[in-house]
Amino acid sequence: MRQNQRILLAASDAAKPFFVGVDVGGTSMKIGLVDDLGRSVHVGEVDSDGTHRSFVAIKTEADPHGATQLIAESIRTMFNRLGIKESQCCGVGFGVPGTMDQKTMCLRELPNLRGWNGFPVAIELAGNVGMPVTFSNDANAAAYGEYWVGSAAGHPSVALLTLGTGIGCGIILDGRSVNGYNGYGGECGHIIIDNSKDAMLCGCGVRGHLEAYAGALGVARRTLQLTNYHKSSIRNHITPETRLSDISRIVYNEAEKGDALAIEIIVETANYIALGITSILHTIDPACILLGGAMTFGGKKSAVGKLFLQSVTDGVEKHTFKAIADNLVIDFPVLGSDAGYIGAAGLARKEYTDNKKQSQYTK
């Protein structure tokens, strides 16, 4: 099924070499071709005449063997239709919602793709496509996309928080993705912001994590508690059939209408996020913090989104050192859902250029 049609750079106008980015989700995956400057040449499928390009989502196979074969076939089809030689592409970036054991090169646990657990995805995909494959957690891929050609372009480092059902985080320091020794670098949704015995329970099973308070499910649980004691139009829109994951959207809608409790919940959520950001700042001191994902309360297009961003900024200024706050940029990302495949391709490009420099140095 086709999604939004977009104007993309013609392959003939692109800066060579090319890099492929694969952004894997729980139900679909996006495959894109990016040039050496981070400009998109193609995403998804191309019409038979080769002129009409459209963005489509390719269904994610539950079987990782089938998925890697499908990706390889899609890449070859893309090259053929665009008239690109495989030799013009120097790598594939692969972003997955999970982590990899760097010692065995096998995936660890993927909550939404359990059939992929333990699968050597980078090794098998490299064999199928016949070119180097660079693995990345999807949050780090998105962060690299913003670092390369998005909101954080020109900054030496960035931490991108993805606010949704949970809270993910991708960290790029001096152009390098922070993966960690065990592959769990950037799990900032699990920063502890409340160590009391009755702290809210996180989805991981531990109490007091940032995600438990400021992820969409945490916002929903707080909202249900507060509407039991405070008058609000929010309660009019919550029924027994309402999913917890939809309540943050209801809060946003009612805040747009001026509901006082809805606005209070959003500001309180911003304050929790500010606490988490402060811990990030005091650990790695990035130049830029980006707030992305599905729960940005309208982003820059909304007065509520602007209030949310300002409340996060105010909270950070309250809790961190003045020198950090004065030099920090806090903003929303600009690449949207494209950040994943662009960043994955960018990480493949970085590995290619690093290896090229190293080989030149050792000659």
Image: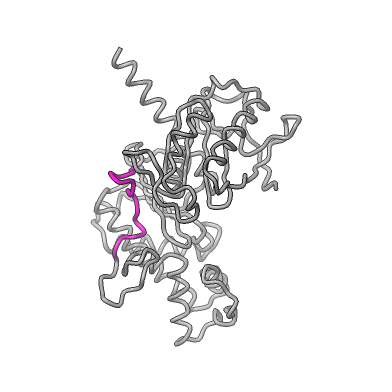
Q: Name which quarter of the figure residue 5 lies in.
A: top right
User: Looking at the image, what colour scheme do you see?
Assistant: one colour
In the image, residue 308 sits, relative to residue 362, either above or below, namely below
The residue positioned 63% from the left and 35% from the top of the image is 8
272 inside magenta stretch: no
184 inside magenta stretch: yes
Residue 68 lies left or right of residue 175; in this view the side is right
Question: How many numbered discs?
Answer: 0
Q: x%, y% of residue 192?
A: 29, 64
In the image, residue 263 sits, relative to residue 106, either above or below, namely below
Q: x%, y% of residue 92?
A: 49, 32
Q: Name which quarter of the figure residue 77 lies in.
A: top right
The residue positioned 72% from the left and 29% from the top of the image is 50
Which quadrant would the C terminus be assigned to in this image? Answer: top left
Q: x%, y% of residue 221?
A: 45, 75
Of 34 and 308, nearer the camera is 34
In the image, residue 140 sits, relative to residue 299, either above or below, namely above
Q: x%, y% of residue 78?
A: 63, 30
In the image, residue 118 sits, relative to residue 74, either above or below, namely below
Majority SS type along the magenta span: loop
Q: Specify the segment rendered in magenta.
A: 178-192
In this view, the residue farthest toward the top is: 363
Residue 140 lies left or right of residue 238; in this view the side is left
In this view, the residue farthest toward the right is: 49
Of 281 and 27, nearer the camera is 27
Q: Name which quarter of the figure residue 134 lies in.
A: top left
The residue positioned 61% from the left and 24% from the top of the image is 13
